[in-house]
Amino acid sequence: MTDETPGPRKERRGGNRPERRPDASMTLIRTMMERPLDPGYAAAAERRHRAGLPGSTSLRSPRLALATIGLGLLLGVAAANLTAEDSPRAAAREELMQQIEDRRTEVDVLSAQAQDLQARVTTLEAAQLAGQGDGERSRELAIAVGALPMEGPGVRVTLDDAPDADEATGDDADQKRVFARDLQFVVNALWAAGAESVSINGHRLTSVSAIRFAGSALVVDYRPLARPYVVTALGDPRELPARFADGAGGSYLSTLHSTFGIRADTEVSADLEVPAAVGLTTRFARIVDTGSSPSSGASTASETEGGAP
């Protein structure tokens, strides 16, 4: 055996290193937790404290607290007045809506009376002319201008907005609604197919009727229409439905339904009614004396035509 003197122990690597903090990699979060106040604000608060002033002017200030309470009360009262059912604004709106409904009902009643009186006048005129041998001619003219209510076979076309029109947004929402031009196209197609009389939602169309778009409502002769829009056309049951379906009208309805989802239904019926037009005005032409004889005017026109190169 050899007698050896043991040497000094070698230190293990890192044996004297300080222990590392568990949150050493979270410096930013630790700083925010330990010093929530910015150093600049802390210095300003220290200066105010040394000067004998309060450290902050937060909600603990009486003036600011009173102002906050006052503003809250003001907003609360305003919100209560706007949402209350018995507020002056709500009462005025309710009264206005009631007036609109009353006027609309009154207009409907007067329109029905006007149609009835118009039919009576036309009947009396036809009876008077019948004694002169012109009764049939008077009836034909009354039918042509829409002065008489009509009934018989024909076609009923119903148009309505797409079922998802209210949920659609942007340009897609407009494309899913019925426009005035849609009704115009359908009505013109019915006339072209041989319709003798046409009405929309009970409003008789004449040669001077107008179908227009006013805001979000469709109007016929300045009377608003409610959905759905029902177009009734009387005509020959053997020709009118087929001509309309095979022509531009049928193709247009098919495109509206397949492309935009608009409801477009066509129904052939043997018993339909079209009311008389309301507000017809008769005008007479009169000869105006211009001071020159017709013979001289005719000779002058003849000379002008003959002398022209």
Image (tube, grey):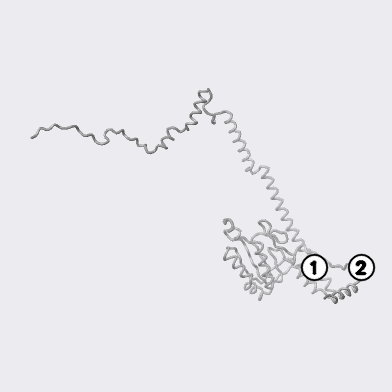
Closer to us: 128 or 233: 233
Q: Could you give the CA–CA distance between mark 1 and mark 2, rounded to whole angstroms? A: 38 Å
Which residue is painted at 67% across and 65% down in the image? 184
Label placed on residue 39: none
- From the image, tell me which residue sits under label 2: 291
Which residue is painted at 65% across and 61% down in the image? 179
Image height of 108 relative to 272, above or below: above
Helix, strand or loop at label 1? It is helix
Identity, as a three-letter code, of the amino acid under mark 2: Gly
106 horizontally vs 168: left or right: right
For the C terminus, the image quarter is: bottom right
Image height of 67 relative to 242, above or below: above
Residue 205, x across and y down, in percent: 72, 66
The total of numbered circles placed on residues is 2
Q: Which mark is in front, 1 or 2?
A: 2
Identity, as a three-letter code, of the amino acid under mark 1: Thr
Closer to us: 20 or 279: 20
* Residue sitting farthest toward the front: 309
Instruction: Using a 10 Å C-alpha cutoff, classify the residue at mark 2 as few (fewer than 14 neighbours), some (14 to 19) or many (20 or more).
Output: few
For the N terminus, the image quarter is: top left
Label placed on residue 122: 1
Image height of 298 relative to 175, above or below: below
Residue 237, x across and y down, in percent: 66, 74
135 horizontally vs 264: left or right: right
Residue 117, x across and y down, in percent: 78, 63
Residue 209, x across and y down, in percent: 73, 64
181 horizontally vs 296: left or right: left
Marks 1 and 2, the one that precedes in the sequence: 1
